[in-house]
Image: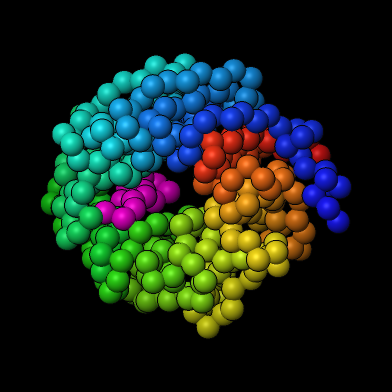
Amino acid sequence: MQDEDIAYLLDSRGVSRDLGAWVVGIAFGREGRSLAFGLGDGSVHMTTAAGAEWRRAEVHDGACLDLCADIREGVLTGGDDGRLMQVAPDGTATELTRYGRKWVEHVAAHEGGFRAASVAKAVHVLDAKGQAVKSLAHPSTVGGLCFDAKGKRLAVSHYNGASLWFVNAKEDKPRVLEWKGSHHAIAFSPDGTHVVTAMQEMSLHGWRLADGQHMRMSGYPTKTHSLSFSAKGKWLATSGAEAVVLWPFFGGGPMGKAPTELAGGDQVMCTRVACHPQHEMVAAGFEDGLVLLAEVTSGRVLPLAPPGQGGVSAMAWNATGTHLAFGTETGFAGLIDLSKR
């Protein structure tokens, strides 16, 4: 079947825009009414959750390096101009702090009240008012960071492992999760029992926090950039192969168990994954621009957007899983309404 014969939902239930620069990150605001696209040219494009209105905000003097949903509304961004910024739903950009000429490479926030921003080897923690709370030092440049589901712990990847911090601790002493090599993308399981990182060596490494058990997941043909746990933590979806690779985190897995592969066979690499926030489904983007939705249990695939707009570089669901947004390396942005059957 040819691409033109496939009914892609972007055509019937979506809106799209050419934003003109690499889409670095996407996030829906926690208030439920806004959606933001952070671009490599330093701008942030805000729209409604339904894609009805679009506003361009000039946020960074250089590139936007990372973007996430902020504590209450709008988004938090970091840039290579050394600034940590908050962008409101109406597009108003406010500088929270700046770190000189050093890049603000990774950002994270939790609705419980904390923000985190990585600058070289340090992770700076800020409160809801934008005030500095503490600075956490690491042995090498930070590769990634994320809060756990409760917002009490912060996991930070770096060379030779990861560090696990309690953000409210009076004494800042991390639990060090060791494994030789370069670690970048990092994810907490929804129940907080596992931490997984993607490595430069084209493999994943995980730790079971209860006893420190190591978990090595290998066999990828290229480096994994995107990790996403399913809503209940049963599966870990990953990019980095010609299919969506899902590792089982149940029944004693993933060690000793083979991963499940979905939507492969076209010899095109999967570049981004995003598990549905409620159901066992995963959205996936590929290096040719194809976007699809796959059901984990049945393997059924729903085509969402056709190839041809550049490699998919960012993807995000809204909180209820009714809308999926994606962006590509060429600056193409799409928003699909999946609320109707």
Residue closer to the observer: 197 or 314: 314
Expressed as whole percent of the image width and height from the top left, the position of residue 89 reads 47, 21
**93 lies above or below 289:** above
Expressed as whole percent of the image width and height from the top left, the position of residue 64 reads 37, 35
Q: Is residue 4 magenta?
A: no
Q: Is residue 235 visible?
A: no
Q: Is residue 166 visible?
A: yes
Q: Give the range drawn in magenta.
A: 142-154
Q: Is residue 150 magenta?
A: yes
Give the quarter of the image for residue 91.
Answer: top left
Residue drawn 51% across the image and 18% down it: 55
Expressed as whole percent of the image width and height from the top left, the position of residue 50 reads 64, 25
Residue closer to the observer: 336 or 126: 336
Viewed as shown, does residue 145 lie left or right of 99?
right
**175 lies above or below 320:** below
Residue drawn 43% across the image and 76% down it: 216
**15 lies above or below 117:** above
- Numbered-mark total: 0
Viewed as shown, does residue 202 lie left or right of 33?
left
Residue closer to the observer: 151 or 271: 271
Residue drawn 49% across the image and 79% down it: 255
**Residue farthest left in this picture:** 171
| Colour mode of the rendering | rainbow
Quarter of the C terminus within the rendering: top right
Residue drawn 59% across the image and 30% down it: 18
Quarter of the N terminus within the rendering: bottom right
Expressed as whole percent of the image width and height from the top left, the position of residue 104 reads 27, 40
